[in-house]
Structures are given as C-alpha cells and as structure tokens.
Image (tube, coloured by chain):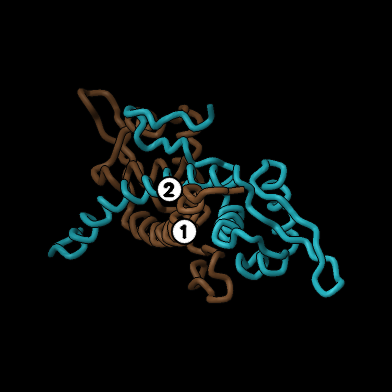
Chain colours: A brown, B cyan
Amino acid sequence: MKNKPESSEAPFAYEGLDRVIHERARLSILTSLLTHPKGLSFVDLKQLCALTDGNLSRHLSVLEKSGLVESLKGHDRNRPLTTSRITPEGRSRYLEYLSTLEQVVRDATGQKRSAQARDLAPGKA
Amino acid sequence: MKNKPESSEAPFAYEGLDRVIHERARLSILTSLLTHPKGLSFVDLKQLCALTDGNLSRHLSVLEKSGLVESLKGHDRNRPLTTSRITPEGRSRYLEYLSTLEQVVRDATGQKRSAQARDLAPGKA
C-alpha cells in the first residue's frame, strides 16, 4: 500500500523513500546492520554510526518497533551483551528503499554531468 | 564545517546527508529543480513531486531561507507567475549531498549482492 509505484505524472515524488528508513541516523544504523548480517553490539554501532548513547537507543527502539531490527541477548566473557540484527523484513524493506535511492541518484546524475559540463564552459553566469 | 570528512572510525555516519536536503519532500523539490535549471512554476512542482499546496509552500520556504532555491516573479499571458529555481549554492550543496548518497548506495549494494546470493542459496533460514 505504502510503496505505490512512482506515477509517471509525479516522477520526482519518490514515494519509496520509507520515512522509517530515510531518517539519517536510522539509515546509518540499517546500512551498518545490512553489511554486518551477524549483528552488531551497541558499542560497535555507536562507533560505526558516530551516534550518542541516547540517539542510538532512541532510533534502535523505533527500528525494533517497526520490525526492521531485533535485539538478541547473549553473553561475552560472562558479561551480558546485547546484539542488534537486521530482520528479514528489515532487509527486504531496506532493499526496496534502496531501489528508490538509486533512482534519485540516476535522476540527479544525468543532470550532474550537464551541470559539470556547464561549469567547464566559458562565460558561466 | 558541517560536512567534515567521513571518519574511518565511523564509516556509516554519513555526515554529508545535509538535513535541509535529505527530507523527502525537499529532496523531491531539489531534484526536480536540478533537472530543470530554468526553473519550474508552483503548479509544475506540485505535480512533479506529488505535494499538496501547503507542503510545497512550507518546504519551498525552508529551501529559500537556506539559500538553496530562489523565487522569480514574472508573467505568463498577463497573469503573474512565480518560478522557483535552484541557486548556484543550492546546486553545489546538492551535488555534495549526492556524493554521500552515492556512498550509501555503494555500501549497501555490496551487501545487496551477497543478500541476493543468500536468497538464492538452498536452505535459507
């Protein structure tokens, strides 16, 4: 329902940019987790994404409530260790999101080349 | 100041995802304007981005205050017509933003391929 196909009349609507995923901190977290499918500890995520404890907690909680991330309680040298992992649904929704992101890049890159060409042209305004 | 280079310790921080540009409606508007450097009328932008009058006004105003978009008052068949255009600063900040977006796609696409390979493998969990 949410990801209706891009209308040919609204080619720049980018409906596929799922708001849960598009937020910058959550995009950081999900990209980290996608590329580390075994999961990451809170400390690792904090460092990879350059987030504060509070921000990481808050955004992980949104991602868990949306079913995109799950947290696994385990142990490391007898100390409790919680690991976050992307869920199969999270991976599938991320990949859907990614296809729209790639469309943005394609749309903009066509223009980027002409923009660069203009920058090189003499007498630019 | 704002776009400090990606730290090698925080490879997923994506600091270059400028919040003014990253918001979905504003990303739609700016991509439309980048690809239409002569400018677009309010009505055209509304249709290309599938935005309501209220949302388009609100986001155009944010983009103008940030210096990324300018509005030009003109006439079309004796009726006043306002056109929005991306500014040189807007184009330059958009292209900077775009390079980080491309990095996200590159980071995720490496994994996307392995994810798809796993999907094709027998006995996936």
Q: Secondary structure at mark 1?
A: helix
Q: Which disc, if any, is residue A120?
A: none
| Label 2 crowd (10 A; few <14 / some 14-19 / many >=20) | many
- How many labels, in total? 2
**Quarter of the image holding residue A73?**
top left
- Side of A102 where A55 appears, left or right: right
Marks 1 and 2 on same chain = no
Residues under numbered marks 1 and 2 in contact, where contact means CB atoms less than 8 Å apart: yes
Between A72 and A39, the one lying in front of the other is: A39
Query: Mark 2 belongs to which subunit?
Result: B
Residue pictured at 32% horizontal, 44% vertical: A33
Residue pictured at 64% horizontal, 61% vertical: B38
- x and y percentages locating residue B34 in the rendered image: 56, 56
- Residue on which disc 2 sits: B101
Between B92 and B119, the one lying in front of the other is: B92
At label 2, which amino acid type do we have? Leu
Residue pictured at 32% horizontal, 29% vertical: B8
Taking the image as drawn, is residue B50 in sight? yes
**Vertical placement of residue B23 versus B77, above or below:** above
- x and y percentages locating residue A78 in the rendered image: 22, 23
**Can you name the residue that lies furthest to the front here?**
A122
At label 1, which amino acid type do we have? Val
**Vertical placement of residue A64 versus B41, above or below:** above
Q: Secondary structure at mark 2?
A: helix
**Quarter of the image holding residue A28?**
top left
| Label 1 crowd (10 A; few <14 / some 14-19 / many >=20) | many
Between A94 and A10, the one lying in front of the other is: A10
Taking the image as drawn, is residue A42 in sight? no
- Side of B119 where B49 appears, left or right: right
Residue pictured at 17% horizontal, 65% vertical: B120
Query: Mark 1 belongs to which subunit?
Result: A
Q: Which disc, if any, is residue A104?
A: 1
